[in-house]
Image (cartoon, helix red, strand yellow):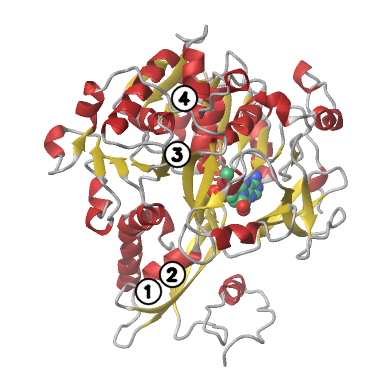
Amino acid sequence: MGKDTLEVIAVEATQANMMDYEEARRQFDWADVEKRFSWYESGKVNLAHEAIDRHAASELKDKIALHYSDPQRDESYTFEQLRQQSNKAANMLRELGIGKGDRVFIFMPRTPELYFTLLGIIKIGAIAGPLFEAFMETAVRDRLLDSGAVAIVTTPKLVGRVPAAELPELKHIIVYGEESELENGQIHFSTAMDAASDETEIEWVEPEDGLILHYTSGSTGKPKGVYHVHQAMLQHEYTGRVVLDLQPDDIYWCTADPGWVTGTSYGIFAPWLNGATNVIRGGRFSPQDWYETIQRYKVTVWYSAPTAFRMLMGAGDEAVEQYDLSSLRHVLSVGEPLNPEVIRWGYRVYQQRIHDTWWMTETGAQLICNYPRMDVRPGSMGRPLPGIEAAIVDDQGNELPPLRMGNLAIKTPWPSMMRKIWNNPAKYEEYVRIPGWYISGDSAYMDEDGYFWFQGRIDDVINTSGERVGPFEVESKLVEHPAVAEAGVIGKPDPVRGEVIKAFISLREGFTASDELKQEITRFVKEGLSAHAAPREIEFKDKLPKTRSGKIMRRVLKAWELELPTGDLSTMED
Ligand code: 6R9
């Protein structure tokens, strides 16, 4: 550990952080969190009811729940208006015969309609499958096919990437856009919403019934459908309160898209379960646009990602000085390691400590955090929340002492833990192979004060701009290109994006390496899979390093790239 890792930015003693961390852990009980929900008394469970309808029936009825804007639109909705719009969406889906347990996908950019639809899906007890708008046909098909989705809500621009003919279970395509842009058999979103009543009967579910399916990447195989249940709301509410520190007057902005878990757990569930005003900004990222958003809405709590902070840092102090960001009182980060340098910069220019938080799609909510009751240690992910036990274990599950690196593991269960991987029990078992522990796939160590320090992924999963990309999915796409014989894909360290995707490719007979071919292959992945999965760099090789059983040795590729020793090559073919 260098000097950086020991530096502490002490927290001021405010009312909220007076309670000692250890004392908070001792007193904590999930049963107390449960009592904060109306279902504790009524026995009627539905996350959308707790997030929206409960507030619409309270003094928060006319409070702004959603400030939405993009370069074309500027709208605000109260809790009561969100209740009505999500009821309409629920009725629209019911009208089509969709009901409890059905998978309904959402494939559209951030607009208010995305949020109405997602809440509507949850209100009827169906399972929401949000897809990032950058996904191309192969990515969309794999996810809809695996989940057996019966319906998708999308836009005229994106509907072309939904290969309906290859999806036997997909019955309904609902399109949000101009009616004239629709094709035969498609349902016009706005017409159906207009016709639907704004009152509905909520489908009461069991706490263990399905809520949402987030597809995420592993190192092998197709993307995995991570399945979450309504019970997760306990942890969304709790972490919204103690980690986001949401207070009645806060204006909260989470910059993540709901295609990723941060955009649902913390872009939808946590803020609304806490009755907070939520800002959603559509359109593209630019430092000016983001600062303008903070200034305009007087954002107080801001949750973003290291890549974004690094890009903002790259835009310089001058960009900050042009705006009034004095409303900010709490800033948080997730998705990748948060560099101490970024924290120091943020402290200087925003006068805010950026609080790192650690969790995963599979964990459903935050687990290890720097939160307002604690001192921030720049470079550390923080400490486990009350109610959460974390440890570093070896491959046999033995707990390791402080400062030893190993598997970052969490004691099972916790309320927002995934309940299964859709269609793939074997994959799920890999996470819980050590009895009593969830094995995260991250390596880390713990310091003597119980702070956890991220070291890396144990598998080959790439984290580019905070988004998980499975090398296998990219390699599979690459080898579909007629020129590509074999491909190996790695994450290459990058100062802004954390990692960028680099592909090593051997060409088929008759093809010659050229810059044009590189561009052509990149375009092929961009158009077939998604822009964020396309390699930023391609290197042609005559042969790729492989094991005797034919597996491409990504670790050797990585060692080549970083000019490091290649390590044990005993399993490599001649
Ligand atoms: C919420 C989310 C999960 C993976 C995780 C880890 C990395 C997330 C981090 C972090 C270092 C942090 N990660 N938070 N690494 N410090 N604070 O990001 O979910 O997209 O599933 O990614 O991201 O490697 O295992 P997801």
Residue 338 visible in rendering: no
- The first of marks 2 and 4 along the sequence is 4
Residue situated in front as seen by the camera: 404 or 5: 404
Instruction: Kindly indicate whether the residue at mark 3 contacts the one at mark 4 (C-beta within 8 angstroms).
Output: no
- Residue position for label 1: 479
Q: Secondary structure at mark 3?
A: loop
Residue located beneath label 4 in the image: 279
In the rendered image, the quadrant that contains the N terminus is bottom right
Alpha carbons under labels 3 and 2: distance apart: 25 Å
Q: Position of residue 332 (x, y in %)?
A: 62, 34
The residue that disc 3 covers is 257
Quarter occupied by residue 527: bottom left
Q: What residue is shown at x 53% (from left), y 22% (from top)?
A: 50
| C-alpha separation, residue under disc 1 versus residue under disc 2 | 6 Å
User: Is disc 1 surrounded by few (<14), some (14 to 19) or many (20+) residues within 10 Å?
Assistant: some
Q: Are the two marked residues, 1 and 2, in contact with CB atoms closer than 8 angstroms?
A: yes
Q: Is residue 420 left or right of residue 415?
A: left
Q: How many marks?
A: 4
Q: Which residue is mark 2?
A: 475
Marks 3/1: CA–CA distance = 30 Å
Query: How many angstroms separate mark 4 from mark 1 (CA)?
Result: 42 Å
Looking at the image, tell me whether mark 4 or mark 3 is earlier in sequence order. 3
Marks 4 and 3, how far apart at CA: 12 Å
Is residue 62 positioned above or below 138 on the image? Answer: above
Amino acid carrying label 3: it is Asp
N-terminal of the pair, mark 3 or mark 2, is 3
